[in-house]
Image: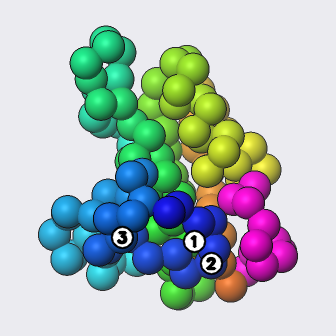
């Protein structure tokens, strides 16, 4: 199950098909200042697309414990799926800039969000 709860665990969460669960421990233990989502390919029918990468980057940004925001850059937002997942998980209200097919989001950590418990991502 994929819940937008604050401090949502990604590592070992095989119940959520959108969570990237098989990356090295360093990936999950790092508090990222910047995340660039530009893979995997999604422009032909058999390509996996970026849905899991978008979801996981949104969760990783919210799970940040330290001060500051996480800058998430998403490429190829001209495609319907990338744009839909960006709006659902990275949230329009956190989009600070765009240039062509590249969108830039500043995601605050969960402690600095004004959302209520149980709210969706946006």
Q: x, y (%) of residue 67?
A: 59, 84
How many residues crowd mark 2 within 10 Å: few (<14), some (14–19), many (20+)? some
Residue shown at 73% from the left, 80% from the top: 112
Q: x, y (%) of residue 84?
A: 62, 32
Task: Let me know if residue 36 appears in the view.
Answer: no
* Residue 16: in magenta span: no
- Element under label 1? helix
Q: x, y (%) of residue 83?
A: 60, 29
| 7 with respect to 16 (left or right) | right
Which of the two marks, 2 or 3, is nearer to us in this view?
Answer: 3
- Element under label 3? loop
Determine whether label 1 and label 2 are within 8 Å by CB.
yes
Determine whether label 3 and label 1 are within 8 Å by CB.
no
- In the drawing, what numbered circle is on residue 62? 1
N-term-proximal mark, 2 vs 3: 2
Q: In which quarter of the image is residue 9?
A: bottom left
How many residues crowd mark 3 within 10 Å: few (<14), some (14–19), many (20+)? some
Q: Which residue is denoted by mark 2 in the rendering? A: 6
* Residue 113: in magenta span: yes
CA–CA distance in space, label 3 to label 1 = 16 Å
Query: Looking at this view, is 26 or 44 the one in front?
Result: 44
Q: Which residues are drawn in magenta?
A: 112-122
Q: Which residue is denoted by mark 3 in the rendering? A: 13
Kindly give the residue lying farthest to the left in the view shown: 24
**Is the C terminus in the top left, top right, bottom left or bottom right quadrant?**
bottom right
Residue shown at 29% from the left, 74% from the top: 12
Task: Let me know if residue 6 appears in the view.
Answer: yes
N-term-proximal mark, 1 vs 2: 2
Q: Quadrant of residue 98?
A: top right
CA–CA distance in space, label 2 to label 3 = 15 Å
| 3 with respect to 45 (left or right) | right
Residue shown at 57% from the left, 39% from the top: 85
């Amino acid at each position: 199950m994929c819940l937008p709860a604050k401090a949502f665990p990604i590592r070992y969460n095989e119940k959520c098909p959108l969570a990237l669960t098989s990356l090295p421990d360093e990936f999950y233990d790092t508090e990222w200042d910047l995340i660039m989502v530009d893979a995997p390919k999604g422009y032909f029918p058999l390509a996996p697309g970026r849905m899991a990468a978008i979801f996981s980057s949104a969760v990783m940004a919210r799970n940040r414990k330290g001060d500051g925001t996480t800058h998430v850059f998403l490429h190829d937002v001209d495609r319907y799926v990338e744009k839909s997942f960006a709006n659902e998980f990275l949230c329009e209200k956190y989009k600070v800039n765009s240039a062509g097919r590249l969108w830039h989001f500043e995601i605050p950590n969960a402690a600095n969000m004004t959302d209520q418990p149980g709210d969706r991502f946006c």
